[in-house]
Amino acid sequence: MESESVAKAAHCLLLPFPCQGHVNPMLQLLKRLEHEGVRVTLVLHRFFSKKFHKIPTSIATEYISDGFDNGGFEEAESYKIYFQRSRQVGTQTLGELIEKLYRSGNSVDCIVYDSHLSWVLDVAKRFGILGASFLTQNLAVDSIYYHVKKGKLQIPLLEQSVLLPGLPLLAPKDVPSFLCDNESYPAMLDYILDQFSNIEDADWVLCNSFYELETDVAEWFTKILPKLRTIGPTIPSMFLDKRLEDDDYGCALLKSEECIKWLDERKKGSVCYISFGSMATLNEEQMGEIACALRDSDCCFLWVVRTTEECKLPKDFVKKSEKGLIVTWCPQLQVLAHEAVGCFVTHCGWNSTIEALSLGVPMVAMPQWTDQTTNAKYITDVLKMGLRAPADEKGIVRRESLKNCIKEMMETENGKEMKKNALNWKTLATKAVDEGGSSDRNITEFVSTLLDI
Ligand SMILES: O=c1ccn([C@@H]2O[C@H](COP(=O)(O)OP(=O)(O)O[C@H]3O[C@H](CO)[C@@H](O)[C@H](O)[C@H]3O)[C@@H](O)[C@H]2O)c(=O)[nH]1
């Protein structure tokens, strides 16, 4: 009876930004809210839902349109056109969805939306619904963008370093890439900054980070945004506090290939795992340098090369051997949790970064763009659990540099020290989400607001 009345009390829509790196943390929050007795509906962009390899049937799912139902960003003529039209059509179709739900007696109390979809807050307000903005990048990056949006940091950042409250001194190479080069992707930069156009009006601001990880910047930010709460790492409980069983991500854009059996046959700490996430595209020269670094390294390797990137591999490169395995997609958390994995060469997407620190895996940072440059700075200088592979004047990380970084991580005392630091972060991350931890308390506080409605 009790759970029935709770279920009636709160219905929350969760609306992720349509890409893998944004849907994963939202799904974890969804499962946690469900676990606490909140009724949740996942709202997906229609084009995005078609890309999924699997969406669990247990998740109540609804759809909205962004005006590009067949291809999303890829269908639009430009980012600018996509962002304008998706805001307009999204506003309309989300409103229609809420009305439809009302008519079927399924009224909505709160919408948790990816902060990149800031227009959702206007829709929530129009219907008198609570709006919770979900920051899927970390507070350091959010703070930098916030300062730019509020006119407190002038861009482009050329030569000068930046010092902001609660953050280390950031050289131009450490700030989000769009702030140094604000001309290549002006529409994308505007869109990113727009996360902070109305954030003060959100009823809640949730962030996929944890207090112990970003204490100083969290303290500063909560003075500006009193409703800001860290709720991460939003990775499946089975990899952290183990409170929820059989709790994998559940939604995947791509089908994972078998690689755990291959890892099972490798020695503890002997494999270097390489992945550049779901979006980054490397040029052929860079792919060739990575291939040679891996071929010439003493360690084994597991390398994720998405199907769209495979044509850039050197023609004669062997895809499966004793030493190495190339897959098009893998169950990354299981891979990072595997004892054979000794280090992770990463593009430093925030999910990959927080997953690696939650599983105690040291990293070699090869940031490509956006927030990844700032995450790389954190991995090396703040978390002290990795090295940044130096790039040359063309922006390419050469084979010798990468090989040396991998060797240092896997074979030296310095590498051992970083592994120790990584394991320390793993402990702190687990504590944050475990019962009574900082993120757990913040989620409980958020849930109690929903249940009080
Ligand atoms: O073979 C793979 C490779 C990746 N993943 C998962 O895919 C996600 C990738 O996310 P992330 O590391 O954040 O990279 P992107 O997909 O590139 O994410 C985009 O979104 C992030 C969150 O905003 C940003 O930090 C990144 O810079 C941006 O590129 C992670 O959960 C991984 O576990 C897999 O499951 N299997």
Image (tube, helix red, strand yellow):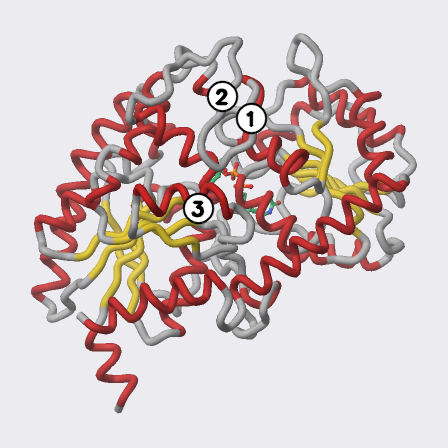
Type of amino acid under label 1:
Leu
State if disc 1 and disc 2 touch (CB < 8 Å). Answer: yes
Q: Residue at x 82, y 39 (%)?
A: 409
Quarter residue 311 falls in: top right
Callout 2 secondary element: loop
Instruction: List x then y, in percent, for residue 55.
Output: 43, 58
Residue position for label 3: 218
The residue nearer to you, when weighing 308 against 286, is 286
The reply, left or right, for residue 289 in relation to residue 48 is right
Which residue in the protein does label 2 denote?
A: 162
Is ligand 1 less than 8 Å from the beta carbon at label 1? no
Name the residue type under label 3.
Ala
Q: CA distance from mark 2 to mark 1?
A: 6 Å
Q: Nearer the viewer, residue 196 or 159?
A: 159
Sequence-wise, the earlier of marks 2 and 3 is 2
At label 3, counting other C-alpha atoms closer than 10 Å, the crowd grade (few under 14, some 14-19, many 20 or more) is many
Q: Of marks 1 and 3, which one's residue comes earlier in the chain?
A: 1
Q: Position of residue 331 (x, y in %)?
A: 62, 53
**What is the distance, in whole Å, between disc 1 and disc 3 at their CAs?**
17 Å
Pinpoint residue 45: horizontal percent, then vertical percent: 30, 45
Going by the numbered disc 2, the residue's amino acid type is Val
Q: Position of residue 3 (x, y in %)?
A: 29, 84
* Residue that label 1 marks: 169
Quarter of the image for residue 262 reads: bottom right
